[in-house]
Image (cartoon, helix red, strand yellow):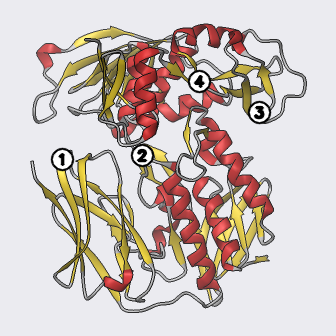
Amino acid sequence: MIKTDVVIIGGGPCGLAAACGVEKSGAKCVILERDERLGGILNQCIHNGFGLHVFNEELTGPEYAHRWIDKVNECKNVKYYLNSFVYMIECTPNGYLVSAYNDEDLIEVEAKAVILALGCREKPAGSVQLLGTRPSGIFTAGCAQKLINIEGKSVGKRVVILGSGDIGLIMARRLTCEGATVLGIYEIMPQSGGLARNITQCVKDFNIPLNLSTTVTRVEGDKRLTGVYVAPVDQKLQPVAELEKFIPCDTLLLSVGLLPEIEIANDFQLEFNPTTNSYCVDEYFQTSKTGLFCAGNVLHVNDLVDNVSREGQHAGECAGLYALGKLPTAEKVEITFDDHIKYTAPKYIYKTGAGEVQVSFRVNKNYRRTIIRAISGGVEISRRPAPVVTAGEMQTVTIDKSKIQEDLHFEIQVLE
Amino acid sequence: MKKLETICIRCPIGCHLVVTEQNGEVVVTGNRCPRGAEYGKQEFTRPMRTVTTIYKMSNGDTLSVRTKGDIEKSKYWDVIKTIKSAPEPKNPQFGDVLVHNILDSGVDVIITAVNKN
């Protein structure tokens, strides 16, 4: 059995930064990574656009991962195990026991703290209503990304994409560059779920049709997909049957959302947030169980890997301090918010008095000309005009903790 | 008057830019930072893009590659074709140059990852 201060589950952007955070705190840690290398999904994200905030330059996914792997390799008190799939977390008198399969062996690591840095999974075909047969040729966008970018395979020639999340948009460009024809992207909502810049550089640059308020209703094919039916949707998002049409194609990519991979901690019955499909955390990224931390995309799906790294690093520092018995605790304040806001992360802040805390949140729909306000004890303690806030963009506000009274409330004042 | 409306791709905010030419001078509005002004001017006069793709090795490995700087958007496909047909490197490593000065653009194509298969 290995003994350490902190176990980090996952060696992607969150886990790597978390390890650096633990190192900074002076504690020791072990990363358990199920893949054969560190970096996580970044390895298959060969496009540029990562690292503008953390490194002040635009890097590709593998390069961004490389930077963090270098940092981790410089750490004196970080060890990592590859090909190690964690299957259980248990409580022990000393903290936690994390068990993993490593090739043919089992690894057991005992630590005072655990950081969940597992990222998220793509919603599979089963999560959308697709009538018809079940031929080959239907992939999630990220799965196709791995097959094409890492394994050098082709997934198909004539492709339809359902959903317009960022991975779907990026894959539209990748497939086109690899010689496939992307016949269209179909999005059930009236707006794309992806970043505006990806619509420009991945879709418009390549003249790929982006069809909003339209969805794929049925698939057809015996062994291989031979086509899909698409139809516009009404205001209740129900397909209009009379307008359904057939599109011959051999491949359907799904980019319909992500789900935090939280199952490993199910048995602890942690405080859960149905909005994020994940756990609630305090400002240390600690769940409702002390010593069990959760950050990055397993906590909530971020738009930017830079934010994932920031969260991971902070969670790592806090978990390290916790393991060393140095993490300050104080009276908890629950963050409340108005109905423009869907959730905040963290949910709780400690009245430790000094320092700053960053609070991230998402709004329920797009607004123009707004003011983002934070109020405590009836006094406005933070105010930021935001010309545009969109549902697809995470907002982050930095709060001066010395100004926090008995409560902390966030609101969006919409002027237009 | 020439006018271009576009979304800035320099960062994830995605500012809505309006670019016009007034008395011979290119004017950008809607940007929130100097990078946006620069991007708007460039998109108006000579659109540029970073190209990222993969290179397949004969042993089944793949190399992730990117242009080290932006290249002219009009040459996007030629750049892709040139990368795909480049001579196979021996023992490629992270950071190595796969194609020097691609299409005389002054930009190198570098290896961003080596994926063993």
Q: Which tag is nearer the camera, tag 3 or tag 2?
A: 3
Q: How far apart are marks 1 and 3 (CA)?
A: 43 Å
Q: Is mark 2 on a helix, strand or loop?
A: strand
Residue A376 vs A13, above or below: the answer is below
Q: Which tag is nearer the camera, tag 4 or tag 1?
A: 4
Q: Where is residue A46 in the image (x, y as percent from the top left)?
A: 61, 32
Disc 2 designates what residue?
Answer: A258
Quadrant showing the N terminus of chain A: bottom right
Which residue is pictured at 59% across the width and 24% down the height? B70
Q: Distance between the residues labelled 3 and 2?
A: 27 Å
Q: Distance between the residues labelled 4 and 1?
A: 34 Å
Disc 3 designates what residue?
Answer: B114
| Amino acid type, callout 3 | Val
Are discs 3 and 2 located on one and the same chain?
no
Whichever of callouts 1 and 2 sits on the residue coming sooner in the sequence is 2
Q: Which tag is nearer the camera, tag 1 or tag 2?
A: 1
- Do callouts 1 and 2 mark residues in contact (Cβ within 8 Å)? no
Q: Is mark 3 on a helix, strand or loop?
A: strand
Q: How far apart are marks 4 and 3 (CA)?
A: 22 Å
Q: Which tag is nearer the camera, tag 2 or tag 4?
A: 4
| Amino acid type, callout 1 | Tyr
Q: How far apart are marks 2 and 4 (CA)?
A: 31 Å
Which residue is pictured at 9% across the width and 47% down the height? A416
- Do callouts 1 and 3 mark residues in contact (Cβ within 8 Å)? no
| Amino acid type, callout 2 | Leu
Residue B43 vs A304, above or below: the answer is above
